[in-house]
Image: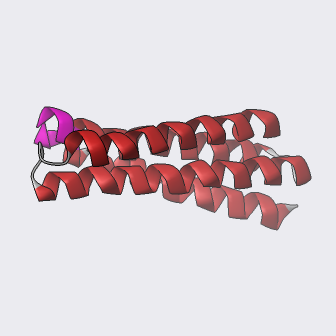
Amino acid sequence: MERFFAIAGAVAAMIGVILGAFGTHGLRGRLSPADLEIFETGVQYHIYHALGLFAVAWAASRWPSGATTLAGWLLIVGIVIFSGSLYTLVLTGQRWLGAVTPVGGLALIAGWGALAWAVLRS
């Protein structure tokens, strides 16, 4: 699983950089400052948690367990739901997506908790 999560982290980071550049160069001037800030928040959390996937990959190589695997999947789901909902909210104007964002945040929190649990149990 460590290879999978390392690849997932690299791909997620690559996508985060692409979206960050898109926000800076393609959306500036087209979005309100508030919407641009929301988009940038999505990018920040996207990149932070892409790097977190590398921590999961490292932990999986050192302390393989179901909790480590769960941590990786929770971070992936959290990136998709948290950052994805913010990107979609800004790009489509569908404000109801703001209600979905905390679900992604909970997945991210749970992912870090699962990683801590995996290391603690080892």
- Which span of residues is magenta-colored? 89-97
- Estimate the x, y position of residue 32 in percent, counting from the top left: 9, 52
Q: Do we see residue 45 in this rendering? A: yes
Outermost residue toward the front in this view: 25
Residue 68 against residue 3 in the figure, above or below:
below
Question: Which quadrant: the N terminus?
Answer: top right
Q: Nearer the viewer, residue 26 or 15?
A: 26
- Estimate the x, y position of residue 50 in percent, counting from the top left: 58, 48
Outermost residue toward the bottom in this view: 120
Residue 79 against residue 58 in the figure, above or below:
above
Total marks in image:
0
Q: Quadrant of residue 44?
A: bottom left
- What residue is drawn where x is 55% and y is 53%? 49
Question: Position of 72 compared to 82: left or right?
Answer: right
- Estimate the x, y position of residue 122 in percent, counting from the top left: 88, 61
Q: Nearer the viewer, residue 49 or 24?
A: 24
Question: Position of 70 compared to 99: left or right?
Answer: right
Q: Do we see residue 1 in this rendering? A: no
Question: Position of 31 compared to 122: left or right?
Answer: left
The prevailing secondary structure element of the residues shown in magenta is helix
- What residue is drawn where x is 37% and y is 48%? 103
- What residue is drawn where x is 39% and y is 40%? 19
- What residue is drawn where x is 61% and y is 61%? 113
- Estimate the x, y position of residue 48 in percent, counting from the top left: 53, 57
Q: Is residue 120 magenta?
A: no
